[in-house]
Image: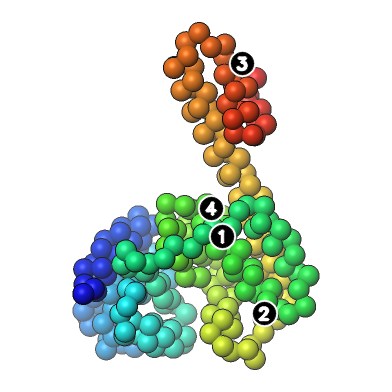
Amino acid sequence: MIDFAANESLALEEYLPRLGARGYRVIRRPTRADLPPFLEDYGADAIAIGPDGKNIIVEVVTKGNPTARSKVRKLREILADHPEWRLEVIYGGASERQVPIASIPATEGTVADLDKLADARASLLLAWASLGAIARHLNPAETTRPQTPGRVVELLAAGGFVTPTQAEGLRSMANIRNQVIHGNMNLQPSAGQLQELIQTTRGLVPVLKEQHGLKLQTETQITICRWLTERPSCDASHCVQLAVTQRHEIIRYGYL
C-alpha cells in the first residue's frame, strides 16, 4: 500500500528549503489565518510568501493518489484571477518516472527551427520543451523529476539566466501553454507573444553552451590534476594531451 502522506512529507522536506534559500517565507501546512480569503477553504500543502509580493502555493502530487490531479486542476482555476499567486506542483514518490534529457545539439537545433513551424501552437509547445531541457542542463541536481512550467521559470530566474521582465513574460506564456496542452485548441499566442518567447529561448542557448564548456573545462582540469598526482613522472603537457584526447574535446587553457 502506498503511503501518500509519507511521500508528500519527503517531497516537501526536499523542496521547501530551496524556496527559503531564495528569500521566501515558507509555511508548511498553513492554517486558514495564513491564507488569503480565496484560499481559506483549501488545504494547502505549503505556501511561500515572496519578498516582492509574488507568492507561491505548493501542491504535492504523488503517483497513484486519486484526488491529487483534480485538486491541482481546481487550484489552477482559482489562481487564474490572482496573478500575485502562482501554483508550484512537485512530485512525490520513488516511482515517479524520470524523463531523459535532450542533448545540447538537439536542443539547439530545435530552438533554431522554432519560427519555421506553420502552427504557432506547435512553436509554443516546442519552445517550452526547449526551455525545460535548458533548465535541466543548467540545474541537473534540482531537475531529476518532471518540472512544471512555473518551476522551469523559477529555476531560470533564480539562476540569473533570465531577467525579471523575461520571467514575467514566461509566466504569462506558461498559462497559454497549459491551456493548449490540456485541450484548448482554440487558443493561440499572438505573433508578438510567440516572438518574445522564441527570443528568450534563443538567448539561453549561448548561456547553456558556455556553462557546458565551463563544466567540461573543470572536469578536464580535475582529470589532469589526478593524472599528475598518480603519475609523478608524467610530463605535464603530455598529461594535458591525454586528458583532452580522452574526452574528445579541444580545450585551451590560460596556462598553455
* Res 3 visible: yes
Q: For the residue marked with disc 3, what is the amino acid?
A: Ser
- The residue shown at (42%, 58%) is 144
Q: Position of residue 8 (x, y in %)?
A: 27, 70
Q: For the residue marked with disc 4, what is the amino acid?
A: His
Give the mark nearer the N terminus: 1 vs 2: 2
Give the residue at mark 2.
121
Query: Is 117 on the left or on the right of 179, as rendered?
Result: right
Give the residue at mark 3.
237
Q: For the residue marked with disc 1, what is the amino acid?
A: Ala
Give the mark nearer the N terminus: 2 vs 3: 2
Q: Position of residue 176 (x, y in %)?
A: 58, 81
Query: Which quadrant holds residue 54?
Result: bottom left
- The residue shown at (72%, 71%) is 195
Q: For the residue marked with disc 2, what is the amino acid?
A: Arg
Give the residue at mark 1.
133
Asked whether disc 1 touches disc 2, contact meaning CB atoms under 8 Å apart, the reply is: no
Residue found at the very far top of the displayed protein:
233
What separation in Å lies between label 1 and label 2 (alpha carbons)? Answer: 19 Å
Q: Which mark is residue 137?
A: 4
**Looking at the figure, which quarter contains the N terminus?**
bottom left
What separation in Å lies between label 1 and label 4 (alpha carbons)? Answer: 6 Å
- The residue shown at (35%, 57%) is 18
